[in-house]
Image: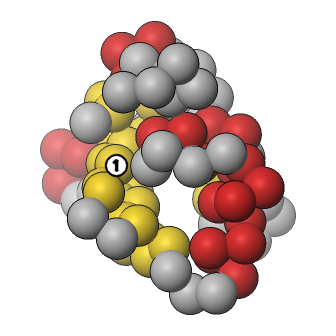
């Protein structure tokens, strides 16, 4: 891991996404990009090119209100489990 990559454990409890008026998550490239080894500007460029993929899953049952978001870039992947307000409960 390079110095620009945050330690996933350091994000626990941190608000990593905002929930917009429609209930969608809005992430900050300064947080997600380094998890994939990308500077924020490069993350946005790769996202626009379709090179960064995201899978969003909504919790049900005992996980109701939680969300799991997986970001993928080439062979890299980062998984975030968030509470209803966008705070990180788990980062891998």
Residue 8 image point, x, y percent: 38, 24
At 72% from the left and 72% from the top, the residue drawn is: 45
Query: What is the quadrant of the C terminus in the image?
Result: top left
At 24% from the left and 46% from the top, the residue drawn is: 63
Q: Is residue 75 left or right of residue 29?
A: left
Residue that badge 1 annotates? 78
Specify the farthest residue to the top.
10
Residue 51 image point, x, y percent: 50, 80
Q: Is the residue marked by circle 1 packed among few (<14), some (14-19), or many (20+) residues within 10 Å?
A: some
Q: Can residue 61 be spotted in the picture?
A: yes
Q: Secondary structure at mark 1?
A: strand
Is residue 91 depicted above or below 79 in this figure? above
Is residue 26 depicted above or below 2 in this figure? below
Q: Is residue 78 left or right of residue 53?
A: left
Q: Is residue 41 left or right of residue 46?
A: right
Q: Can residue 58 be spotted in the picture?
A: no
Which image quadrant for residue 15? top right
Total numbered badges shown on the rendered structure: 1
């Amino acid at each position: 891991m390079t110095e620009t990559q945050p330690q996933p454990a350091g994000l626990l409890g941190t608000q990593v996404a905002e929930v917009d008026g429609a209930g969608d998550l809005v992430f900050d490239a300064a947080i997600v990009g380094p998890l994939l080894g990308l500077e924020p500007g490069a993350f946005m460029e790769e996202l626009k090119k379709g090179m960064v993929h995201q899978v969003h899953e909504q919790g049900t049952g005992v996980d109701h209100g939680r969300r799991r978001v997986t970001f993928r870039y080439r062979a890299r992947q980062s998984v975030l489990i968030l509470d209803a307000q966008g705070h990180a409960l788990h980062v891998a």
